[in-house]
Structures are given as structure tokens and as C-alpha cells.
Amino acid sequence: MQTKLLVDYLQNYRGRPLKLMEVCGTHTAALYRSGLRNLLPPSVQLLSGPGCPVCVTPTAYIDKLVDLSRQPGHCVLSFGDMLAVPGSRDSLLSARARGGHCDFFYQPEDVLERAAREPQTTFILAAVGFETTAPVWAALAETILARGLTNIKFLTALKTMPQVLEELCRTADIDGFLCPGHVAVITGSEIFRPLAVRYHKPMVVGGFTPELLAAALCRLVSAASHKEAGLWNEYGAFVKPQGNVKAQALLQKVFTAGPASWRGLMVLPASGLYLQGPYAVLDAGSRGLDADQIPPGCSCGQVLTGRLTSRECPLFGKACMPSQPVGACMVSNEGSCRIVYEEQG
């Protein structure tokens, strides 16, 4: 009954036109698959944001991985979707076809056994993600040092959400934000409150089931329609105000903040995480990978910042498809272009 009331509210909204952004790629997928996006009236526009870690990774990072895959005695390991992301010259898949050495893993811990089994190979881990997965990489770095494994290195493209949300608050025409629930499990919901206050925006932390999404959308639409600023946590069963304090302590121990390049936004100060102290010996050259050579016609940068929808990209569904991606947004399962292509064709 409660869900029906929420859906009725969304369907019958007759307030002022709104531009809202779901920051998280998992939210984008859930909104399409639940059908909630299609229930919204034309006056409420939902825009995808920069919450796909593969999508916001610049081409310089891919190029560095490709170069490392071609070095004798090296092998790059990554999650499967990273293999197909185009760099300025090659993807890891095309590099492998030309003799480069790369492979995928299901979970980062898989490298430990492989590194012990192949001590003659230096394994480069493509450590990509946000606050959600950064603790996993931090724990792995601790384990590698503790075991004395010297043939594992990290190339990190780990990013943090508050900085990119602030940039969007400053520069994008967005009336309110559906904040990333998985990230908030680690950071806590309160990390978004200063932005809501400073930029007078409604920010709602949402879950991923149809019921939780409907509740979060109703809260966001209501607040945005009344120009009501504030922070609301509609994912309270998993997201606490202060988040996971142990995970935060681990991140502070292993990583330090530094500038990072985001596709579509260029370099944002203090938005990247880099290995520090005794863990810095594991770094394979992660800093300064800022160049982002987007292919001609590709609109990934505009899609990630809410300036265009996926369907407005001139390459969408034509030159750019999951089987032949031109831009990173068509590669990842969290990428807006791939989600829209697969859900609506």
C-alpha cells in the first residue's frame, strides 16, 4: 500500500519542472529495471551522473595500463569491464591481441595466490573504484606487505564522491541529487550535508529496491519542487550518519588524498586516493595520469555531468554499441549508455 502511494505521488506530480541526478550507476540500472523512471511525468527529468568508476577514468590511465601490459615480465589484472575501455590508442583487449599481457579477476584477492605461484611475473592491479571498494584495495595492500610479496603493484584510479558532487553543485543545472547508497555505507550520510547547506540543494541517500527507490524519489521530488535544501537518509537500514568508522580508518592509514582527473570534469583537487607511507612502494605510477583524449563525437563527458542524455549522443546505438564501444559509458554495466542501450534498445 505504501509503495502504491509513493508511485501515485510520482505519477501525478504537477509541480514545477525539475532536473534531478542519480549519481550512482547502480541507481541508474535499478531505476530502469524497476520501471520507476518511466512512471515519472515529463516535467521530472532524471539525469545520470559520474557514479560509474570505469566511466570517469581518463584515457591516460588506460594508456598506462596498456604500456605496462607490454613490458616484459608484467601482467595487468583488472575487473572484466576495464579490459574493453578504449584508451587513446588501444584498450587492454586490443593490446592483448597484439601481445600484451592482461587478464581479469573476479575479486582482487585472487592475485595473492597467483603472485605466489608466479614469482617471476610482476602483476599490476587496476585498482579502480570509489569509497565503496577502496577499503578492499586497502586491506589487500596490507596483506601484500604482511606476506612480503614483492611482485604485486597497484595502478590506482580511486576517487571520492564529495568533491565531484561539489563540482556539479557549482557548475551543473541540477535541482537535487539522489546520493549513492553504497558509497554512503562507508562514508556515512552526513558527508553530504555540508554540500546541501552550502549550495542550497536537496540531497537524498537512497537504496536500490523498487520500494526504497520510490521513497527516495518522492522525498527528492517533494523537496526540490519546494526548493527545500537539506539531507535525507532513505537507506537508514544500511547507512548510518557517520558510516563505517573502521573502514574509514583503514582508508586514512593506507591512502592519502590528491588531485585526480574525472572524465568530463578534468582534474578535481583532493578527489583521488593514493598509496602513502609504507604502502607507497606498491604504487606503479598512479599520479599525474590526467590526460583524457575522448574520441571525436563521443559525449561521455557530457553524459557523466548531466549535460546530455545517452540518447542525445550522436554515436549512441550507431557507431557506439556494447559490442563495439567508442566511449567508456558504453562498456561498464554501470555506464549510462550501456544501461539505456540494453534496457530500451
Image: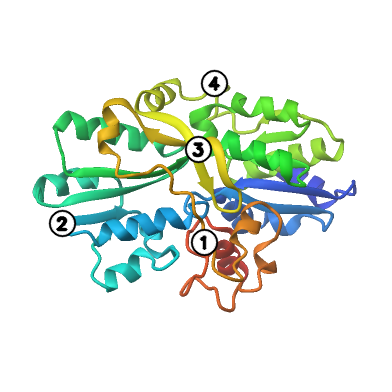
The residue wearing badge 4 is 242
Q: Nearer the viewer, residue 174 or 284?
A: 284
Q: Nearer the viewer, residue 221 or 54?
A: 54
Residue 209 position in % (x across, y down): 58, 45
- Label 1: which secondary element: loop
Number of the label disc, if any, that sits on residue 73? 2
Disc on the earlier residue, 1 or 2: 2
The residue wearing badge 1 is 293
Q: Which of marks 3 and 4 is in front?
A: 3
| Amino acid on which disc 1 is placed | Gln
Residue 344 position in % (x across, y down): 63, 69
* Residue 205 image-quadrant placement: top right
| Amino acid on which disc 3 is placed | Pro
Q: Which of marks 4 and 2 is in front?
A: 2
* C-alpha distance separating marks 4 and 1: 38 Å
* C-alpha distance separating marks 3 and 4: 25 Å
Say which residue appears at 39% left-offset and 68% top-offset.
Answer: 90
Disc on the earlier residue, 4 or 1: 4
Question: Taking 315 as reference, is 76 left or right?
Answer: left
| Amino acid on which disc 2 is placed | Gly
Q: In this view, does 256 lie above or below 172?
A: above
The residue wearing badge 3 is 259
- Label 4: which secondary element: loop
Residue 76 visible? The answer is: yes
